[in-house]
Structure formats: structure tokens, C-alpha cells
Image: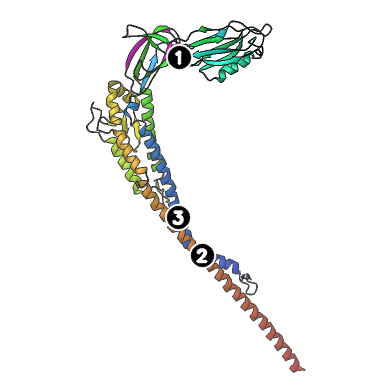
Amino acid sequence: MATINVGGLATGLDTNKIITQLVALERAPMDILQTQRDAVAAHQTALQTFNSKVLAFLTAVDAVRNGDDVLARTATSSNPSVLTATAGSGASTGTTTLTVLDLARNAIATSANGLASATATVATGSGNFVFHVGSGHDQTVAVDGTTTLQGLATAINGKDAGVTASVVNVGTTASPDFRLRIASKDTGSSNDLTIVTDDTTLAVAVTQPATNASFNVTGFTDPLTREHNTFDDVIPGVTLSLAGNGGPVTVSVGTDVQGVTKNVQTVVNAFNDIVAFVASQSQVTQDASASDHRVTAGPLAFDSTVRTVLASLHGMISSAVSGLQGGVTLLAQVGITTQRDGTLAFDTGKLATALTADAGAVSSLFGGGGAVGGVADRLHDYLTGLTQSGGLIAINAKSISDQIAGIDDQLAAGQRHLDDFQSNLRTTFTNLEVLVSNLQTQSGYITALTNALGGTSKS
């Protein structure tokens, strides 16, 4: 049944204002609880961001965990117009000289006789056009007096036999001269093209035989050959792409100092991002102007888990790795040092010097050597355990989630109590208004009756 809100009509009291003020007083503990929930939620958000930054740091660390990444190589060619070189994993430093004698080519066959249009017919009667690529099977296309030049090219392509057929106008628009062109898709002598039967009027013949690439390499007396112009089996770990005849061309393979520096800089930046974020979320300030000198703390100011993580990471970064060969056992030896604010400084010149002096030792420092793990290995293991399900961050996050859930339950219960409290107040004040109204009505009746009785006695 709906409660009637009388609103002080009988008593003259502002009952709505009184109820609002009483409810506000009753709500005070809930307001405190809501403030507490907001603080815990801010802590939860900050921890989630912290976790994402830790994961970004793990990704950066993994980029220098493999020794081949630290020993990244770069290859340069003294004449890119003749050949280019790209170094990959396992490339050895040094120089190699090559002279390109001939490029690998595909086979091309063209028609000696031209036609006035692509739709002109190519045969006077029934017959076949037969070809094959390398040692492949004969490919047969039937032709007759209705077969057009374009139709023949389309039928050849439909065989999917390792060739591409096209119609080319070698003449002009005013004086057209359409020819058939057939080209093998792959280079090398094993992809040569053979015209077996030509029952057309085109007189198709091979005009460019397929050939292998031929080149001289220092250390070999006879030229080397390859079926393709791109290959990776001459200089270990290096892919060569031939572009033209010429030489000698020197291919130099060295440590990719710039690439390694970029990866290490990413690690340093990712770590510094964590440190800066934690610092920004851990500030504690006091408001001297407030009467109670109120203290405000950031959401991570008192998070012991975050402090433990940072302390552990700093220890792993600054401590030496024992058991490594080469004498490089500290990150400080390759330019990475810890500053007073907890961030890392990176001297790129020092890393470059270390890579030039002994790239293998630098590789071992990050990626380990033999049974000994490097700095990146121990960071990887710690960060993986830290961020996985059941790890330290996950445990902390669950504790915060449980805390929020508990506060939400209290807020829900408090709201139910507040709703009941407000409803009871309105019922009480409504009953009061009704009572006063009834009393006022009775008082008026009695007054009127008294006045009436008094008038009668006088008469």
C-alpha cells in the first residue's frame, strides 16, 4: 500500500526537509564506506596497469634473451646494383667477394608470325599445340579453325603447367602486330621450355632459354651456379640476391650494433616506465591548510607486493652473473646502471664498445652460455612466474577483488537499511500529520459546540 506524503500540512513542520536530513545522517557510515571502496578500486586499477607494464617489460626482455638476437648481424654489399645481402641468425662476421657472371633467367617462347588482332584465329584446321616445362609431362591444347589468339593463351594458362601465356601487341595501334608470349614462371635450367608440337600458323619458338645464375666466389676455382637469383647457401646465415652482372662485389658481415642497441634500449625504457608509474602512484602528500592536516596517499603507496617486485628486479639487474666466459658479468659493463631515483641509465657508446670488443661475451651476459643463464634468462623466469595465473600479482589482485566484493555487500545491505529507515520515517511523520489533523478537527468541533451551548444559555 502506498504511503501518503502529507508534508507538514497539519503540523506546519517541513517534514520532507527533516526526513532528508535524518536520512543524510543515517547515510554517513555508507559515505565513508563508499570512499573506502573508491580507494580500493583505484588500487585495483593501478595494479592492473602495473601488471600490463610488467608484461611489456617481459616482452622487451625476451627480445634479448636469445644469444642470436644479441649477436644480430648486418650484411652490406659494396655494389647493391649487382647484388644485395641480408644477414640472418648464425651469420659469421667477415668479408666475401663475389663476381656475377650471369643471372638466372626463365624461359620465354614467342610467335614469329603476328596477327591483326587478339581475336584473330590461329589455325586453319584441327590440330594441337603441345609444350612442356623441364622434365614435366607434355601439355596439350587442341586447336581448330575457330581458336583465337587470346583463346589459345587462355587455354595454356588453364593448364596450370608452370607457364604464363599472354598476347602482346609488338606493333602500333595503327599497324597492330599481335604475338603470343609464353614464359616459364621459375628460373633455372630445370625450368626450360620446350615446344613439342605447333599446329598453328604462329610459328612459336623458344627465344630465351632458361639459365642458371653463375658467379665466382673467393675461395672457389670454378664458378658456382644456382637456379634462382636469391639463395642463402653460399655465405652461412646470409641471403644473397643477384641483381645484375658485374663485380667483384664485397659482402661484409658484422654485428648489428644499431639493432642490438635498439632492443636493449627498449628493455631499459620498459623498466623505467614501471619505476616512473609506481612513483607517480605512490606519492604521499599532506594538506597543511586543512585543520586536520589530512594526508593523501597514492593507490600503490602501501602496496608491499609492488615494492617486493621492484626490489627483486633491481637486484637481478644490478647483480653479477657468475659462471660466464669472457669476463662480462655485469650490465654496468655494457652501459646499464641504476640511478638514484631507481630508473636505469643506458650508455649506448659503452655497449657498442663491448660488442666490438667481444660480442660473444655480451651475448652470454644477456642470453647465457651453456648451462649458465644470463640476465635476460633470470628476468624472464621471474617475470613469467610473477604474471602467470597464481603468481604474486594475481594473488594480490584477487585479494583486492575480494575486498571490493565485501564492501559492495556492505553497501547493498546499508542501502536496504537506508530505504527501510526512510520509509519508516515517512510513515511516522505521516501518522503524526494525520493525528494532528484529527486533533485539530476535534478541537474545532468542540469549540463550535461550546460556542453554541454558550449562546443558548444566554437566551
Res 7 → quadrant: bottom right
Q: Earlier in the sequence, mark 2 or mark 1?
A: 1
Q: In the rendered image of this protein, does residue 380 appear above or below residue 194?
A: below
Q: Is residue 437 above or below residue 343?
A: below
> Quick one: quadrant of the C terminus?
bottom right
Q: Nearer the viewer, mark 2 or mark 3?
A: 2
Badge 3 density bin: few <14, some 14–19, many ≥20, Cα 10 Å: some
Which residue is found at the position 28% from the left and 28% from the top?
Answer: 364
Q: Which residue is mark 1?
A: 135
Q: Foreground residue, 120 or 245?
A: 120
Provide residue 275's location: percent of width, then percent of height. Answer: 37, 39
Q: Nearer the viewer, mark 2 or mark 1?
A: 1
Instruction: Determine crowd level at label 1: few under 14, some 14-19, many 20+ residues with C-alpha closer than 10 A.
Output: few
Picture quadrant where residue 201 is located: top right
Judged by depth in the image, the label closer to the viewer, 1 or 3, is 1
Q: For the residues marked 2 and 1, what is the alpha-carbon distance in whole angstroms? A: 87 Å
**Point 34% across, 18% down: residue:** 236
Residue at image mark 2:
416
For badge 2, the amino acid type reads Arg
The reply to whether the magenta stretch includes residue 118 is no
Q: Is residue 357 visible?
A: yes
Q: Which residues are magenta?
A: 78-105
Horizontal and vertical percent for residue 117?
66, 11
Amino acid type of disc 3? Answer: Arg
Say what secondary structure mark 2 lies in: helix
- Name the residue type under label 1: Ser
Mark 1 and mark 3: Cα distance apart in space: 78 Å
First in sequence: mark 2 or mark 3? 3
The residue lying toward the viewer, choosing from 136 and 353, is: 136
Q: CA distance from mark 2 to mark 3?
A: 18 Å
Q: Which residue is mark 3?
A: 37
What numbered label is drawn on residue 330? none
